[in-house]
Image (cartoon, grey):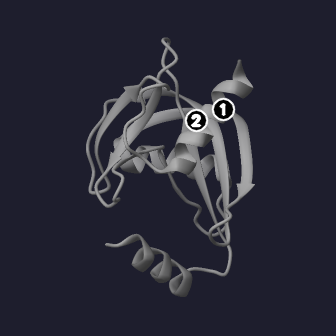
Amino acid sequence: MPMWLHVFAVRITQPKFNAGVSALVFDEAGRVLLFKHTYRKYEWGIPGGALEYGEEPADAMIREFYEEAALKIEVVKLLKATSAREFPHLGITYLCKITGGEFKSSHEISEMSYFDINELPSMLFAEKELIRWAVREMA
């Protein structure tokens, strides 16, 4: 689906302001975990998803990670909460660590892989910037 159509569909079917969560997970070598999404133009991206009504953001991140990859995570800390420039969306990003499970692909995610932060694949610019920002903040 073209991005403009996706944005249009979200705008007419979602609340006036929506919120989503994302997780940054790093391995011992400092590489960042990315998911290969089945529905995006730029397939590789940060794990995440939308909050359900009445759901706590950290719980949403745990749920989304499990639904998309069958992995259990622990939310370590809040990294950032920011309002998107492109449309009315609040993005909440957590530092997380994997605590259990074994990766299983889903209808949304076909693969996962760790990437060196200086060799990120083709992905959304905003997500690359978020990763680089987080690495600088955690240094």
Whether residue 75 can be seen here: no
- Please indicate whether residue 27 sits to the left or right of residue 111 in the image: right
> Which residue in the structure is indicated by mark 1?
134
> Measured from the top left, where is residue 125 in percent x and y?
52, 48
> Which residue in the structure is indicated by mark 2?
131
Residue 34 found in image quarter: top left
Dot 2 falls on a residue whose secondary structure is helix
Relative to 108, say whether 77 is above or below.
above
Crowding at label 1, few (<14), some or many (≥20) Cα neighbours within 10 Å?
A: some
> Measured from the top left, where is residue 101 in percent x and y?
37, 30
Residue 6 found in image quarter: bottom left
- The residue type indicated by label 2 comes to Ile
- Please indicate whether residue 119 sits to the left or right of residue 91 in the image: left
Which residue is found at the position 61% from the left and 49% from the top?
59
- The residue type indicated by label 1 comes to Ala
Dot 1 falls on a residue whose secondary structure is helix
Which residue is found at the position 28% from the left and 55% from the top?
38
Relative to 63, say whether 134 is above or below.
above
